[in-house]
Amino acid sequence: MTEKSLSQLRGRIEVWARELGFDQTGVADCDLSHVEQHLHDWLDQGWHGDMDFMAAHGTKRTRPPELVPGTRRVISVRMNYLPDDVTPANSVLDDPRRAYVARYAVGRDYHKVLRNRLEALAQKIRNEVGGFGYRVFTDSAPVMEVELANKAGLGWRGKHTLLLNRDAGSWFFLGEIYTNLDLPVDQPQTEHCGDCTRCMDICPTQAIIAPYRLDARRCISYLTIEHKGSIPVEFRTLIGNRIYGCDDCQLVCPWNRFAQKATLSDFDVRNGLDSSDLVSLFAWDEQMFDRNTRGSAIRRIGHERWLRNIACSLGNAVTSAEVVAALDSRADHPSALVREHVAWAIAQHLEAGNSVTDNLLAT
């Protein structure tokens, strides 16, 4: 294709992407050499915890043509996900009876939504140019999503390590199409965080150990989603009522005053997961968990870790007969992981010296 025809195609891709629900599109080249050493240093520090997949692919993460041979460009897209009808986050976080779920996970699983629409976008390109080499990604392979989105002009990396956009904040998903088409590239955005450290200061576990440096082992999102074992005792009280992920760093970011709501109904709240009470969620058996999380990103953690997380939050709840009875109902759970966190939670209420706890556990 000629340079002119590639430029015209780039414009059509922007239009098609908008029609498919994407809020912004950019194109990047494949040179990520400037971040390769940073990634190696992060892995060497062990800050990825037990996310072994972060270190499992050698240089494929920072060298797109090694992951998909023939790749010349990366089409990067973003899609707003904050539901219009979602309960205000702070009203949930301030109520220890209720469970906080990261706002990206209260609706349909974004992997499916973005992947299907990226495939549809690739099909539109195929209809225009004929056969071409490509592969779509949505947080599903060794892809440096934020760095590619930055190079494609979609935003800059904030100090919390998420992508920020001057017109949309950070409440959006990213997706990519690796392609062999020599499309014209966009220019990166400059950084606009300045001296602000609100995201670092607010982090309950101080996981953002320096600007642009995150120790995942301390991050509540990692602890409640990626981590498969026991939540370290030193972080359990700090988790509060966050049972799946954490949005604190986004909630305080000044750029999110420009955040835009989702336009797709896929991200609408399901099963009241934006403000459910902890005791009710803790009562879900495995079948109910599977049914209520079908099509949700939450399902990937499984029922055992679901109970682990909620037990931890119940340990942080205000002592009441209802809370203690809920914990006691899982005290003999078949899973050692669940039993451990239930025992810890019960001990938290016993230490409070509340007579309600003493009387209930004595019966």
Image (cartoon, helix red, strand yellow):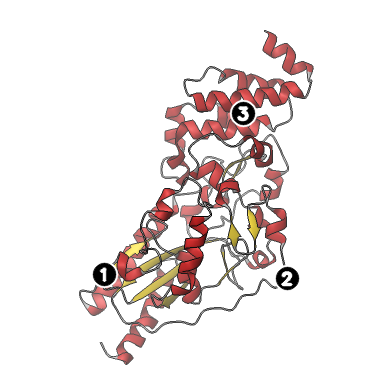
* Quadrant position of residue 329: top right
The local secondary structure at tag 1 comes to loop
Marker disc for residue 130: none
Quarter in which the N terminus is drawn? bottom left
Marker disc for residue 279: 3
- Count residues near mark 1 (Cα–Cα under 10 Å), then give few for <14, some for 14-19, many for 20+: few
Q: Are marks 1 and 3 in contact (CB under 8 Å)?
A: no
Q: Which is nearer the N-term, disc 3 or disc 2?
A: 2
From the top left corner, tell me how far across and down residue 298 is, in percent: 48, 43
* Quadrant position of residue 278: top right
- Circle 2 sits on which residue? 195
Name which residue lies at 61% across and 28% down.
279
Marker disc for residue 69: 1
Indicate the amino acid at tag 3: Val
Compared with 90, 96 (above or below) is: above
Quote the CA–CA distance across marks 1 and 3: 50 Å
Indicate the amino acid at tag 2: Asp
Q: Residue 107 versus residue 282: which sits nearer the camera?
A: 282
The answer to whether one can see residue 241 in this image is: no
Quote the CA–CA distance across marks 1 and 2: 41 Å
Name which residue lies at 41% across and 76% down.
31
The local secondary structure at tag 2 comes to loop
